[in-house]
Amino acid sequence: MWVDEYKYLGLLFTKDKGFRGCVHQAGSRVYKALGRITGLVSLNNELGASVDLQQRLFDTLALAGGDYGCLAWCLPLLPPVRHAASGTTRAAANPVERAHLTFLRRLLRAPKSTPLPALYRETRRRPWTVRWAAAVARFWNQAVDTTRNATKLTPVVLDANRDLWRAGARCWSSELHTFLAGLGPELASALGSRQPLDDGAITAALCEQYDRAWSNLGDPRTPTTAHRPLATYKHWLWMEDELHAERSTYLHVSAVPHRIALRVANFRFGHQCLRVNQRYTNERLPFASRTCNRCTLGAIDDAAHLLFECAGAALPHVRSRFGALLRAIPSQADIAAKLRSLFNTQNQASLALYVSDCMHQTALVVGP
Ligand SMILES: [Zn+2]
């Protein structure tokens, strides 16, 4: 009997789309896991549900669902795409990444307008495609390493698939080749010669493509700068890799109350409490008019002005309370270096309280 749809080991294979429907199943599994995480967190209030804990729950409950069977269906989704509006490179739209982003936004209560590269960076995450690409490389290397004999089917099937690709057919190997060629010719050549793939190099090359979003960003204080929240994050608020690697940013330090951590995250993404960020609610307001109304300096109301320069709204008093934190900042440095020094302090708990207290002084504090 002929069928149009077949399920093998839980993976859906259809006559028209092959394995293409599988990513939707994977997306549903991740969304289901998000529901379980929300349930666990709300049922167990005493856990405190820190950002760290929720990320660990996500890794335990959601990752496997998004990865399951990805070898069969992930290849067409691996090459990054250029986003039409922002011009930045991002993961091809797919239900698993959408669920991932839903989780990250909920985690930090970040609005939809949050620049994606900043959301990933803040949470120490990468698009899911980086995981899938590593899984494909591991699978390939295992198959390449296996001695060919009659009892092991996978390597033989893979060899046959490679032959198909070389004959010009569209198949798994051709999709892998397209992906690798997009990362660099030296990576793609391993396929033709049946050599192991350098999975570290693949991950690095893929991440490098996503990281292009961070290049060519203008000065946050220049009126013509495009992507201002992203430029501000990069030039002023960037936390160094070591802080992220040690999980010692304000998001992971237990001394920072959850509610404060969320406020600081939103400040770093471009909070509306600063007039410079009121581009959605007040978009007709030209850049030059987004000045501070707490003091008489006539300066643009941006993160640097609030944290270091503004003399209004009792801010000097707040600064005097955080003397130890602020004295550690090189006084001769330019404003960008001062901000980066502040945000890279080892005393992340004090930094978080300082930013939160300064935000309190702005009249427009809303949200988390
Ligand atoms: Zn001011």
Image: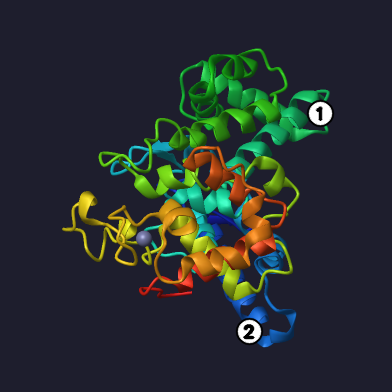
Amino acid type indicated by mark 1: Ala
Residue 319 lies left or right of residue 306; in this view the side is right
Residue identified by numbered label 2: 42
- Say whether residue 213 is visible: yes
- Residue 232 at x, y = what percent? 43, 46
Amino acid type indicated by mark 2: Ser
Q: Nearer the viewer, mark 1 or mark 2?
A: 2
Chosen colour scheme = rainbow
- Residue 226 at x, y = what percent? 30, 41
Residue 109 lies left or right of residue 147; in this view the side is left
Residue 116's place in the image compared with 38, above or below, is: above
> Which residue is depicted at the point 41% across and 59% down?
310
Residue 354 lies in quadrant: bottom right
Residue 175 lies left or right of residue 299; in this view the side is right
Mark 2: C-beta under 8 Å from nearest atom of ligand 1: no
Secondary structure beneath disc 1?
Answer: loop
Marker disc for residue 160? none
Residue 311 lies left or right of residue 252; in this view the side is left
> Which residue is depicted at the point 44% across and 72% down?
361
Residue identified by numbered label 1: 150
